[in-house]
């Protein structure tokens, strides 16, 4: 399978199964488009008809281009066969180990963000803080079920996790004590709205947190419209200086400033550029996922404009990189020479199997977006995963088990998409959230184009 597209003056051909990316001239682009469906002589005729007035496009040049495509196919770099389909259906039999937990240390929050999927941190339930004993048991559960895997990941999440700051510190200390005992290494992350950041918290985060996710939606008027305090005030003026200080203290590494764009700011590139102009270099901007009837929900009519925004963002990132003031955008991070192993490219994040969320009461869910839905309760940190049938469903949730993915060129980049988004959009974890798919494919096209542009600049 190949995917061809033209963007920012580049003719790009992606060979899906080999992962090869080719930036070609117009003649080669058109030859490749006809290569598998058209007789060779007919290809030559059509190319001479189209390019005949160009002196450098002769019959021999067209034949030479066809032979070059022949060689690329023989080398497995074009029209490569799918080697991976047979791997996708033995995952149910795999003895998966747990490698990561999302600890919901606080089901409460000091902001009342309108679009919050967690119902302002309550997850459709009662407000609660995780006790140290529950958190300790969660870490023991992770260690006990991680098998021989040495590197383990824990994300402190909420609500707002800093509202349970003392327990966070105690759990990190406990995990560090357990590392030499069990030959494990913990990598911690924390997601915060920034309201409670201070010098003490910054110092601890810089010492112990591999990554910190900072929630900021961009321009002040955009951010404050949906991210307000309990008293109804905007939070922008409070958190931006705190975020700038933390990012500076981390040497602009090991953090993400993460925003959410909605129907209210479909010109979201202006929010990304605003955050970059504030000095942040590690950025992410996610489309809102909410009920279709919500006033801030993205609509089908928004899609063409959103596609344009992703292209605007990609072109500006190239320009800023050349000027020496580049920044990273999470969805454009793409390693074309290496990247994740094929197992990860097929299965994705591992929710419900390798990755679980833990409520303040110790209940287990496939990920944070399922928390509070009793149909997706998987067990608890004392008894382990007792709903093994549900776990088996998630084992078979991958890029090859969704029929809609079979003809999609991007499936080995998205691994079939987010199970939670699919569930909320279709009622099934094996469904497809089509709106998200369309945005994802556009982001990958832009990400590949950026790589092509920067490689071209490097070769000059």
Image: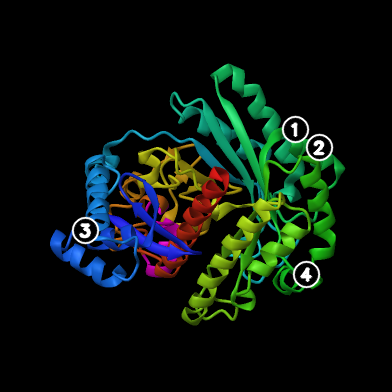
- Secondary structure beneath dot 2 equals helix
The crowd level at tag 3 (other Cα within 10 Å; few <14, some 14-19, many 20+) is some
Dot 1 or dot 3, earlier in sequence: 3
Q: Which residue is mark 3?
A: 35
Q: Which residue is mark 4?
A: 220
| Magenta stretch prevailing secondary structure | helix
Q: Which residue is mark 2?
A: 203
- Which stretch did the figure color magenta? 414-427
Q: How many marks?
A: 4
**Of circles 4 and 2, which is in front?**
4
- Secondary structure beneath dot 3 equals loop
Measure how far apart labels 1 and 4 are at the Cα level.
30 Å
Measure how far apart labels 3 and 2 are at the Cα level.
59 Å
Tell me which residue sits at (66%, 58%) in the image.
127
Dot 3 or dot 4, earlier in sequence: 3
Tell me which residue sits at (71%, 49%) in the image.
324
Looking at the image, residue 185 lies above or below residue 216: above
The answer to which of 223 and 266 lies nearer the viewer is: 266
Is residue 218 toward the left or the right of residue 285 in the image? right
Dot 3 or dot 2, earlier in sequence: 3
Q: Which residue is mark 1?
A: 207
Looking at the image, residue 126 lies above or below residue 393: below
Measure how far apart labels 3 and 4 are at the Cα level.
52 Å
Tell me which residue sits at (48%, 64%) in the image.
9
**Of circles 1 and 4, which is in front?**
4
**Of circles 3 and 4, which is in front?**
3
Measure how far apart labels 4 and 2 are at the Cα level.
27 Å
């Amino acid at each position: 399978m190949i995917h061809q597209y033209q963007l920012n003056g580049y003719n790009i051909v992606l060979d899906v199964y080999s992962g090869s990316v080719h930036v070609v001239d117009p003649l080669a682009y058109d030859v490749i488009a006809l290569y598998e469906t058209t007789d060779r002589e007919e290809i030559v005729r059509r190319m001479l008809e189209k390019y005949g007035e160009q002196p450098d496009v002769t019959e021999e040049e067209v034949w030479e281009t066809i032979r070059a495509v022949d060689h690329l196919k023989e080398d497995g770099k074009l029209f490569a066969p799918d080697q991976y389909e047979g791997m996708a259906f033995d995952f149910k039999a795999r003895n998966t180990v747990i490698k990561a937990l999302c600890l919901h240390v606080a089901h409460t929050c000091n902001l009342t963000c309108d679009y919050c999927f967690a119902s302002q941190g309550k997850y459709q339930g009662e407000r609660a803080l995780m006790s140290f004993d529950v958190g300790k048991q969660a870490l023991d559960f992770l260690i006990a079920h991680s098998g021989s895997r040495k590197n383990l990941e824990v994300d402190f999440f909420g609500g707002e996790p800093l509202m349970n700051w003392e327990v966070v510190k105690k759990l990190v200390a406990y995990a560090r004590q357990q590392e030499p005992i069990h030959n494990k290494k913990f990598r911690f992350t924390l997601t915060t709205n920034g309201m409670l950041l201070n010098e003490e918290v910054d110092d601890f985060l810089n010492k112990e947190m591999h990554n910190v996710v900072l929630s900021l939606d961009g321009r002040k008027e955009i951010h404050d419209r949906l991210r307000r305090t309990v008293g109804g005030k905007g939070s922008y003026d409070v958190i931006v200086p705190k975020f700038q200080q933390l990012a500076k203290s981390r040497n602009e590494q090991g953090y993400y400033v993460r925003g959410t764009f909605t129907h209210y700011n479909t010109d979201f590139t202006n929010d990304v550029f605003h955050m970059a102009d504030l000095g942040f270099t590690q950025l992410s901007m996610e489309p809102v996922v909410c009920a279709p009837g919500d006033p801030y929900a993205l609509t089908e009519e928004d899609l063409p404009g959103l596609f344009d925004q992703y292209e605007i963002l990609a072109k500006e990132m190239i320009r800023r990189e050349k000027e020496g003031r580049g920044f990273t955008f999470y969805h454009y991070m793409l390693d074309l020479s290496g990247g994740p192993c094929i197992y990860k490219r097929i299965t994705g994040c591992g929710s419900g199997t390798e990755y679980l969320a833990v409520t303040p009461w110790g209940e287990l869910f496939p990920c944070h977006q399922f928390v509070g839905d009793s149909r997706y309760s998987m067990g608890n940190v004392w008894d382990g995963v007792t709903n093994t049938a549900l776990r088996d469903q998630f084992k078979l949730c991958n890029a090859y088990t969704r029929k809609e993915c079979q003809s999609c060129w991007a499936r080995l980049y998205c691994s079939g998409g987010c199970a939670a988004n699919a569930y909320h959009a279709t009622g099934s974890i094996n469904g497809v959230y089509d709106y998200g798919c369309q945005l994802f494919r556009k982001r990958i096209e832009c990400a590949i184009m950026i790589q092509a542009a920067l490689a071209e600049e490097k070769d000059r």
